[in-house]
Image (cartoon, rainbow, N blue to C red):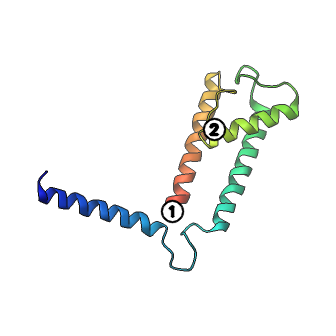
Amino acid sequence: MNPKLQDQTDENNKSINTRIRSLFSSTSGVSSKIKSHEVLYVLAMAFLINFAFALFLLTWVKNSDLSNLPTEVFERFIMLFYFGISIFTTTGFGDISAKSKRMRMVVALYLILVVSGAISFFFEF
């Protein structure tokens, strides 16, 4: 490899490493720029958003929309809350999944909202 090109690559890597370290550096005695109260806020908002999503789905979803959906109301709510969390975290275990086109559209819109919300929070857009 060309020595000048190698030096430039090394400088770029150092610059990237410096930027990454600066995200986690401390200027106010806190070990990172994300403080504990911000993490709690994010977790509380995630819970509330998923709770509201489960309530919405409880009134809107049909048995033909999702697989493995229980019939009893409380069990159904718990399963829909679990479904929302698996979508929110983009885990998707596959034990409950969208079967209809309308449910796939709701899941897609929910994912877009979740991802855009996370990006706007963490990158301060």
Q: Earlier in the sequence, mark 1 or mark 2?
A: 2
Identify which residue is drawn at 65% across, 67% down: 36
Residue 34: name its quadrant: bottom right
Q: To which residue does mark 2 refer?
A: 87
Q: Compared to 113, does 40 lie above or below?
A: below
Image point (74%, 28%), residue name: 61
Q: Answer above or below: position of 18 versus 54.
A: below
Badge 2, how many Cα within 10 Å: few under 14, some, many 20+?
Answer: some
Can residue 41 be seen here? The reply is: yes
Q: How many marks?
A: 2
What residue type is disc 1 on?
Glu
For the residues marked 1 and 2, what is the alpha-carbon distance in whole angstroms? 23 Å
Question: Badge 1: how crowded within 10 Å, few (<14), some, or many (20+)?
Answer: few
The residue type indicated by label 2 comes to Ile
Image position, residue 38 (x, y; %): 64, 65
Residue 125: x and y in percent read 49, 60
Residue matched to label 1: 124
Callouts 1 and 2 close, C-beta under 8 Å: no
